[in-house]
Amino acid sequence: MHNNKLNQFNNIVAVGGGHGLGRVLSALSFLGPKLTGIVATTDNGGSTGRLRQQQDCIAWGDLRNCLSQLSNHPSIGSLLFEYRFTGENELSGHNLGNLILLALDQLCVRPLEAVNLIRQLLKIETKVIPMSEEPTHLVATEASGNRVFGETSVDGMDCHPIALSLEPMVTATCEACDAVRNADLVLLGPGSFLTSIMPPLLLPKFAKALNESRAKVILIDNLTREPSPSADFSLQQRIDWCHQILGLNVVDQVLCHSDKSYQDGIISYRPLVSKHHIGLHDRDALADALASMVELNVDVKASATG
């Protein structure tokens, strides 16, 4: 069912971080080159954080995660790409895919070229684009005025921030801006709201491109409570944050999990949980739910403004 309804679109863009965005991309991978993932690059933890500190590079971990979830499993390429070193040495904890992307980046002119080389190697048709090709960090401002620096520290905050910013402010990847500007459908999430969904929206050129887009925008809610200060955000607060950052009302619909299917205003409730893990969306159910939320040849924003 979902193939026909979603294939009506020429350009579907999904925005977010590693695990959540990767799941969406893999669920919609049948769209091939019609699908584009815009990936947050502010992670500063784990293997990615160590590489960032030593090499002053962008965060590769979420990009690697998305590419891995899009690759055919199992294959030698995918197994190598996801291999994590163990033991008591400098390589311990590093992911080979991160190291490969870093090496290719140093051989290429642009980080996006490194990503595209991996796409070719793993035979991935879906486009995967970093939100920016310049290193930057997420910074949160508390009500007291105190500033919390770095994505892992933001996720560890006791209370939610009143504002977010990027330091240094970097330029959005031009391909990411073009993709969202020309999109027919834009998907936000699932994933950590403050540290996966918000970072790309903080880029002025990307936010401007999204505002100029005539695409329907769907926010995909998480299945489980996220371990971050935004865990207590209501759906309306999440929508308000998106609108506050972008300066316009851009979220048209929200997709949430429920054991029963029903509609409540702009919120669509559908059974979405994977049988294998309560924190993962079932791929087929997610694709079917999104297909049920879109109508053939209807431009929501055009009709709303026209």
Image (spheres, helix red, strand yellow):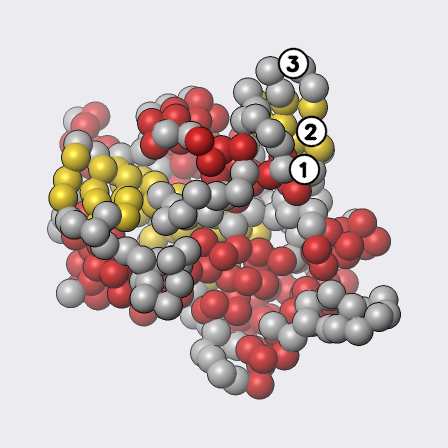
- What's the mark number on residue 153? 1
Q: Are marks 3 and 1 in contact (CB under 8 Å)?
A: no
Q: Are marks 3 and 2 in contact (CB under 8 Å)?
A: no
Name the residue: 80% across, 69% down.
91
Q: Are marks 2 and 1 in contact (CB under 8 Å)?
A: yes
Instruction: Determine which residue is flagged by label 2.
Output: 148
Whole-angstrom CA distance, mark 3 to mark 1, is 16 Å
In the rendered view, would you say 67 is above or below 38?
below
- Residue 72: horizontal and vertical position, in percent? 45, 78
Q: Nearer the viewer, residue 11 or 140?
A: 140
- Residue 195: horizontal and vertical position, in percent? 56, 40
> Image check: 191 left or right of 27?
right
Whole-angstrom CA distance, mark 3 to mark 2, is 11 Å
Q: Secondary structure at mark 2?
A: strand
> Looking at the figure, which quarter contains the C terminus?
top left
Q: Residues within 10 Å of mark 1 (few under 14, many from 20)?
A: some
Whole-angstrom CA distance, mark 2 to mark 1, is 6 Å
Name the residue: 73% across, 65% down.
93
Name the residue: 52% across, 69% down.
68
- Residue 148: horizontal and vertical position, in percent? 69, 29
Q: Quadrant of residue 7?
A: bottom left
Q: Amino acid at mark 3?
A: Ser
Q: Quadrant of residue 160?
A: top right
- What's the mark number on residue 144? 3
Q: Amino acid at mark 2?
A: Val
